[in-house]
Image: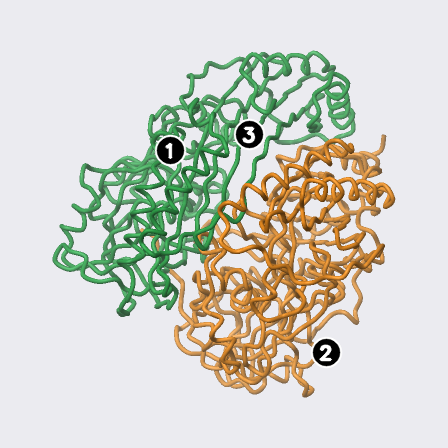
Chain colours: A orange, B green
Amino acid sequence: MRRRDFLYMTGVGLGASMVPNIPAFGKIISVEESLTPVDVALKKKMADVALNAAKSKGATYADVRIGRYLNQVVATRETRVENISNSESYGLGVRVIANGSWGFAATNNLDNSSIAKAAEAAVAIAKGNSKLMDQPVQLAAQKGYGDVSWKTPVEINAFEVPIADKVDLLLKVNSEAMKGGAKYISSNLFMINEQKYFASTEGSYIDQDIHRIWPTFTLTKTDAASGKFETRNALSAPMGMGFEYLKPKDEEKIKGGPVTMYKKRYDMLEDVREAAAHVDEKLKAKPIAPGKYDLVLDPSHLFLTIHESVGHPTELDRVLGYEANYAGTSFLTLDKWESKKFNFGSKEVNIIADKLEVGSLGAVGYDDEGVKCGQWDIIKDGILVNYQTIRDQAHILGLKESQGCCYADSWESIQFQRMPNVSLAPGNAALSAADMVKNVEKGIYMFGRNSYSIDQQRYNFQFSAQLAYEIKEGKIVGMLKDAAYQANTQEFWNSCVQRCDKNDYRLGGTFSDGKGQPGQVSAVSHGSATTRFNGVNVINTGRKLG
Amino acid sequence: MAILSKEEAQAILKKVIGYSKADFCEVGLNGSDGGNIRYARNAVSTAGQISTMSLGVSSTFGKKTGSATINEFDDASLQKVVKRAEELAMLAPENPEFMPLLGPQTFAESNTYNAKTAAMTPDTRAEMVGKSLSVSKAAGLDAAGFLENATRFNAIMNSKGLFAYNKGTNVSFSVTVRNKQGTGSGYVEQDFNDLDKMDTLALSKIAAGKANGSAGAKAIEPGKYTVILEPLAASDILSNMFRGFDARSADEGRSFMSKKGGGTRLGEQLFSENVNIYSDPMNTEIPSATWNGDGLPVKRTQWVEKGIVKNLSYSRYWAAQKNVEPIPFSRSVIIEGGTQSLEDLIKSTEKGILVTRFWYIRSVDPQTLLLTGLTRDGTFYIENGEIKFPIKNFRFNESPVIMLNNVEALGKPVRTGSGLIPPMKIRDFTFTSLSDAI
């Protein structure tokens, strides 16, 4: 068999334990298996078995999720393929309310008897938990939608693309890096397909087919004489798209600045060539002089600041204390929202939650408790106006319906409140990033996510970037090293003075945002245009070891 | 079914090896069985139980290897997974880093298993959580916590006669106790192999005491301070450093252990003279498996002696490249300390800051191992040997390497997080800003 055929076939092979950074892989399956969806009529029959069993045991509400989670990873390093994995996790989880309390059980045995037993177990757990309950669950009303479906609008299903093509692309990336002088280069492609079926005793039967893709690399150069090394990661964004994301288009590029940036198409080869040159600059870069700077933050960097300082503190479960033992609580307490005048940021700050944004990681038609998804304001003209809720929280905000923020990372995980796509709206006036830089006297222009840390109530944070350029009197004068900004969330967003317009708007995102105990991951995007923040405290993080 | 005995595991592995037609075959088998309870706002929020088992086969022809995994254990499935691994091996490119399989090895019998922990039930967990909740409810405080236990086994066998088996148990508990006003917070975290060592009542009282004691925190200026790090806080920072004891990344110039001009810092005085770090899988306080994933025996290894780097870990491949013996790293990291208690360290401090734990630690610069993060759930000002008042949380920017150069005193080691870690008194620890978080 030819090498190309081998590469295709290896999709059935290598061990899940070798897969980097992606937890909870299921059993290894063939590529062919991954392309055969489960029959919807069969899923409906299984769902009804669970719902009827739950009701017969006394559940006043039940929902069932039948999930088939497909993951594919291609990992390479320099001239070799390190891992190719194609895996599946398939099963059913049933959640019920009985005696006013939640219960949950899951099974990967999908015969009628096992499904019914899982539903009965969920009811038994609910009844057991009800003895420790102070208040019964208040579930926001939700109409049943009947038989409906939703699919990520992909042009090319990444699972249909031969593994050989993916390997070829990554090895070309590595080759370009080494031609550019890199000694170490690893490149990876992660692809996820969630085939999810949801049904509830309220009459919804929702079938969804969700796709995500994340191409990335890490390029490293070392200098033995000085003992220094520097790296640069890919400036790609993980996306809720198909393989078309990796088909470059000139109209989806923003050129002219110090870094080429990408919208809904990514040119991995171009990015790695630029990365090789950037690392040379990083090795020679000037240390930052600490002080106050005006920051110009590219969306490839700003997305993570939005995620940490806006997305997480506006999660209602944190506000209420459900994450107190792990991820923490939130400074955005209910009294601040009730006041209707809490000044989260300047008037430039309009933060929108959007569960439908095309290309985003969090885009779905319905959440994991059968709520139709939509869009709403969280920060309006700088004022905190809303949070992120699920059905059993909606009444706390006086809402008649949930905002559809429920998600579980597996059929065997209990769904709970997770962040929707939370984005900073672009400005209305025409403004490019180049125009913005021209008006900055003393500033730093930052690209890409690097180190990030924020306290457990989301006040104090510190971020650094893949690339930091010094701006002097409206011009980019060179690269800086050891630059990190520290700020208080509210002060930072109040220092927001200018946003580029929608032509500069792009999505960033994270593939595996962690929350909960036992931990679960979710993928979410955050959009913005290039944005300016005035007078932010920047520190020098350089140190010397003995 | 999820937890197999040594003999049961051996029987399955022998059967799988028997199906192999490859030049070499290596099979791994593992399973776990456990449960958990999560609670918040003084009430149980979720509870769960899970059992899993899986088998992985790696087949090699020459230097060409293919691998496959499965979680079904009937004969047909076992034959299928072996066949699939062999098909892949026949098609695979040669792996330039392939290492021949190890032959039979001798392993010490580990002491990672405890029958009482393995026998934990949902009722045991509920009772333990009930004790924790009784503390917060009686004190008018709010508790949020997580209790989890598991029994796990791992086994490997290869066609050159290697066989290794390990069975272990673990129970872990953490709780955050906050006052109703949201102005004070305390935390404890503990894990053991042996259930009898876990006292959720006593631990919750410590967290409750910190919640009350940390209310009304004052702001003091960021800067360099003498700190007393409780073992959990020290462990939070040092776990990032232990991963750097890898010879390959040091040789390749990509680690804080890389030497200027090439090579590694093996043999150099990298830390204070009072720093001694070793690992020992047989330590009774923090036992771990006596073999690693390659089937190499894991033995007591001195990593740092009187501040000098004595060993780096070498994979079998990298050891062969460097013509040295492979050295596996071990989870059971132990930093030697003294006999002083945490209270003794406080008493001996003229001015300083007591840190309960750190939070959201991230690498800022891998070259210097600079880390950033924040204090959390109980930070206190010490003056003339006494805790004077609670202080607001700080962000730090510090390297564990620099920190271990500034050690003034070490207390009695305690099992926590990444190992057996003493409370530490450290001078010139760098706090860079204040946080309002509680």
Say the numbered circle drawn on residue A88.
none
Is label 2 in a helix, a strand or a loop? helix
Residue sitting at 70 percent across and 65 percent down?
Answer: A355
Is label 1 in a helix, a strand or a loop? loop
Q: Is residue A34 left or right of residue B253?
A: right
Residue sitting at 71 percent across and 73 percent down?
Answer: A254
Q: Which residue lies under the disc numbered 2?
A: A503
Q: Chain of mark 1?
A: B
Which three-letter amino acid code belongs to the residue tagged 1? Asn
Quarter the C terminus of chain B occupies: bottom left
Q: Are marks 2 and 3 in contact (CB under 8 Å)?
A: no
Residue sitting at 35 percent across and 29 percent down?
Answer: B196
Q: Is residue B67 visible?
A: no
Do dots 2 and 3 share one subunit? no
Note whether A69 is above or below A116 in the view shown: below
* Residue A360 position in % (x across, y down): 71, 63
Query: Which residue is more in the foreground, B311 or B38?
Result: B38
Q: Is residue A26 visible?
A: yes
Q: Is residue B108 left or right of residue B302?
A: right
* Residue B282 position in % (x across, y down): 37, 23
Say the numbered circle drawn on residue B311.
1
Q: Quadrant of residue A265?
A: bottom right
Q: Which residue lies under the disc numbered 3?
A: B33
Depth check, mark 2 against mark 3: the one in front is 3
